[in-house]
Image: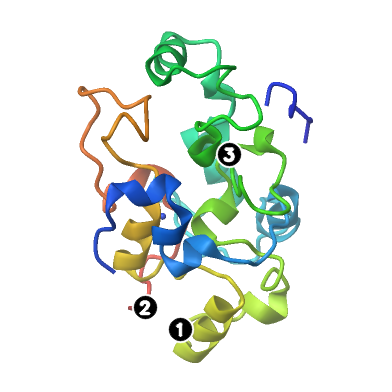
Amino acid sequence: MKQKFGLLGAASFIAIVTLFNPAARPAYAQSSHAYVGESQCENCHDSTHEALKNLIGPDGNPTDPVTVWKADKHSQAFNRLVGNDAATAAVAKAHLAGGAQDDGSMCLKCHATGVGSANPPDPSEGTTCEACHGPAADWVSADAHGHINDDPAKMQAAVALGMINVRDMSIREANCRTCHVKDTSLRPCYVSTEAPFSVHNDKKFRHWRQKIPD
């Protein structure tokens, strides 16, 4: 991935102030686990490696997670911080001293992954798999997460290693709402014409089995 540091992204609802108040964020959002970067996910989950042919995509056909992510806006979250009127307006609204992509910009909390951690991925990767599934250094191996299937014990073990259990809709929603908020002091790019956020409005980035265990 290209380096752009000079110019330098899913329980009940959590108060929106948690977005920039680490002490108030959920335990999985305060994780001390390390990030590995998008390329590590692609090593197993792109179209040339994915062995799970029963993963269903947005069009209802079999797919792989990386293909879905690359076609989704989350993958372009960092790039969308420049070169458009909405980004320019958000920078002005937030009174940012530098650009939206600059190191330290509040925008990178959601338009990149792992910002504020000891080893964040390159911000140009955008909002990646680890933003939703958790920092993966301790569970990226197939032994740690590749055979969870419908086994709650295996899921619990992976969660202990830093995975976010997005099968639990309340946990998924809490994670998503650390970014998908209306408060413009926390998210200056929000506009009132935006469709209301719903964690169930997930068809456009679907990349999972037809039936997922509770």
N-terminal of the two: label 1 or label 2?
Answer: 1
Mark 1 vs mark 2, CA separation in Å: 6 Å
The answer to whether 189 is drawn above or below residue 66 in the figure is above
Image marks 3 and 1: residues in contact by CB distance under 8 Å: no
- Residue at 50 percent of width and 84 percent of height: 156
What amino acid is found at the position of numbered circle 3 in the picture? Ala
Judge whether residue 58 can be spotted in this image: no
Question: Label 1: which residue?
Answer: 150
Task: Tell me what residue is drawn at x 58 percent, y 29 percent.
Answer: 78
Which amino acid is tagged 2? Pro
Does 22 sit above or below residue 181?
below
Label 1 secondary element: loop
Q: Look at label 1 and name its amino acid.
A: Asp
- In the picture, the disc for residue 44 is none
Name the N-terminal-most of marks 2 and 3.
3
Q: Quadrant of residue 173?
A: bottom left
Point out residue 168 in the picture as x, y percentages from the top left corner: 35, 71
Is 32 positioned to the left or the right of 93 in the image? right
Does residue 68 appear left or right of residue 213 in this picture? right
Residue behind mark 2: 213
Seen from the viewer's position, the closer of residues 67 and 24 is 24
Q: Nearer the viewer, mark 3 or mark 1?
A: 3
Q: Position of residue 131 (x, y in %)?
A: 53, 52
Place of residue 209 in the rendered image (x, y in percent of width and height, measured from the top left): 43, 66
Residue 112 is tagged as 3
Do the numbered discs 1 and 2 sit on residues whose CB atoms are within 8 Å? yes
Q: Position of residue 170 (x, y in %)?
A: 29, 66
Work out whether 3 lies above or below 29. above
